[in-house]
Image: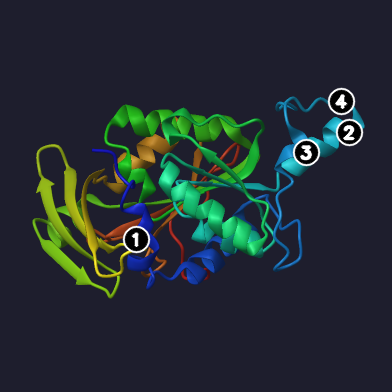
């Protein structure tokens, strides 16, 4: 069953306690410290100049036409939100002045992102694509993929293909920031549990199952959403989601095999060196960059 279809309409309701503003500040800090992308508008001035460099490619010879060189320079400031969902984080980064592109495979999630775009007057470019088949018109200076989007890649080949495409579309010197839920989290913290939450207009039952041999986490969602036309009626629908747990060593290997260089890793909660019981880990990798330290000492936290 395809994920994020019916669930999309209640996703933001159940994610309303997610610290998106903190995440946006944190990502902007990482981009400023390790990346090459810079805001192209003043804070609060949303926009996307994504169409200016279409079909320019990545050739950067010194004899290139001045307009081509200018377009290539503009690509450095493009930031791709890979697995952008309903676009909340994408909008926040746009409001910080970054030139944003959002990619997600769920049409339903992207429709909500488009609604936010229209409401906020931003000019973010949204593309409906599977990250394993990423297809951009130009390079980008930064790729971010957070909120465990990478865990939806269930096979080694899926991760390898995605990371290879990220490397291909990164501008030289660009960075890839992503997070992932660890094997420890699925094995020990989530395990076989049931979670339920009730709101005025919607409720859900989350039944979680961990398949140890495959390292696959399955969660079956049953959702009850109030009908918009008949407020006394609720619609029931179900979705099944699958995620795979990874170790840090596995992720390091995927990064290195893609041609990217590992810049740093950190525990998502403490922003310090990951431990054996880290539940979520941030990774920053770069294209054409020498590896730096592998843990944050707290300066970004």
Residue 67: image tag:
2
Report which residue position mark 4 lands on.
Answer: 64
CA distance for labels 2 and 3? 10 Å
Q: Residue furthest front?
A: 230
Front residue of 298 and 130: 130
Give percent across and percent down for residue 28: 59, 62
Evaluate whether residue 259 shows in this view.
no
CA distance for labels 1 and 3? 35 Å
Q: Is residue 171 left or right of residue 87?
A: right
Task: Report helix, strand or loop for mark 4.
Answer: loop
Task: Report helix, strand or loop for mark 2.
Answer: helix
Report which residue position mark 1 lands on.
Answer: 10
CA distance for labels 2 and 1? 45 Å
Report which residue position mark 3 lands on.
Answer: 52
Q: Residue at x 70, y 68 (%)?
A: 44
Q: Is residue 82 left or right of residue 287?
A: left
User: Is the Cβ of the residue at disc 4 closer than 8 Å to that at disc 2?
Assistant: no
Q: Residue at x 61, y 62 (%)?
A: 119
Judge depth for marks 1 and 4 and give the one in front.
1
User: Is the Cβ of the residue at disc 3 closer than 8 Å to that at disc 4?
Assistant: no
């Amino acid at each position: 069953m395809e994920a994020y279809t019916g669930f999309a309409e209640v996703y933001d309701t159940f994610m309303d306690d997610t610290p998106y503003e903190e995440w946006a500040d944190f990502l902007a800090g990482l981009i400023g410290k390790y990346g090459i992308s810079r805001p192209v508008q003043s804070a609060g001035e949303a926009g996307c100049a994504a169409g200016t460099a279409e079909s320019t490619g990545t050739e950067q010879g010194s004899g290139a036409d001045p307009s081509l060189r200018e377009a290539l320079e503009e690509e450095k400031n493009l930031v791709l939100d890979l697995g952008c969902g309903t676009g909340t984080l994408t909008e926040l980064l746009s409001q910080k002045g970054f030139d944003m592109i959002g990619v997600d495979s769920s049409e339903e999630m992207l429709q909500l992102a488009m609604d936010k775009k229209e409401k906020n007057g931003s000019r973010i470019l949204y593309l409906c694509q599977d990250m394993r088949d990423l297809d951009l018109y130009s390079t980008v200076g930064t790729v971010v993929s957070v909120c465990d989007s990478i865990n939806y890649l269930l096979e080694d080949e899926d991760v390898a293909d995605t990371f290879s495409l990220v490397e291909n579309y990164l501008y030289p010197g660009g960075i890839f920031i992503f997070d992932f839920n660890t094997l420890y989290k699925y094995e020990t913290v989530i395990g076989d549990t049931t979670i339920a939450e009730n709101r005025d207009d919607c409720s859900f039952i989350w039944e979680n199952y961990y398949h140890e041999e495959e390292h696959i986490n399955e969660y079956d969602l049953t959702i009850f959403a109030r009908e918009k036309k008949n407020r006394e009626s609720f619609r029931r629908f179900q979705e099944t989601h699958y995620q795979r747990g990874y170790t840090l060593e596995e992720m390091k290997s995927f990064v290195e095999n893609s041609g990217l260089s590992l810049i740093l890793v950190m525990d998502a909660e403490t922003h310090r060196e990951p431990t054996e019981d880290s539940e979520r880990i941030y990774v920053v990798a770069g294209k054409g960059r020498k590896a730096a330290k592998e843990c944050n000492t707290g300066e970004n936290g």
